[in-house]
Amino acid sequence: MLPPLHIKLGLFKNFVKAMNKSSDDFNYIKQLFPKISADKINKGIFVGPDIRKLLSDPNFVRKLNPLEKAYWLSIVEVFTNYLGN
């Protein structure tokens, strides 16, 4: 069984890779993490503190389109209820 952190990183990586690279929500991620290179953001390479920062940011959810928002909210539910902190 994979450790919870690896599951979180994988889910988050798939979410970021599936995002439209020219959308407002993707640009918001770039603005939120200015020290992370654009190549790492495009590939979805993040660490635990970055994911927690995005999870606690209420403005990010407002920028998502309805399909991405539904996927994001399901990821948050898995992170909080199934995998824990």
Image: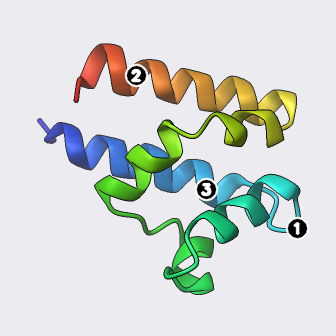
Check disc 2 and give the amino acid type: Val
- Is residue 16 found left or right of 67 in the rendered image? left
**Mark 1 and mark 3: Cα distance apart in space:** 12 Å
At numbered mark 2, what does the secondary structure look like: helix, strand or loop? Answer: helix
Badge number at residue 78? 2
Which of the numbered marks, if any, corresponds to residue 7?
A: none
Which residue does the image show at 73% across and 29% down from the upper left?
69
Q: Residue at x 35, y 51 (%)?
A: 9
Q: Is residue 3 above or below residue 21?
A: above
The quarter holding residue 71 reads: top right
The residue carrying pointer 2 sits among few (fewer than 14), some (14 to 19) or many (20 or more) residues within 10 Å by Cα, namely: some
Quarter of the image with the C terminus is top left
Mark identifier at residue 22: 1
The residue at the point 20 percent across, 37 percent down is 4
Residue to which mark 3 is pinned: 16
Q: How is the image coloured?
A: rainbow
Secondary structure type for disc 3: helix
Left or right of 48 on screen, residue 28: right
Q: CA distance from mark 2 to mark 1?
A: 27 Å
6 up-or-down from 78: above or below: below
Camera sees residue 64: no
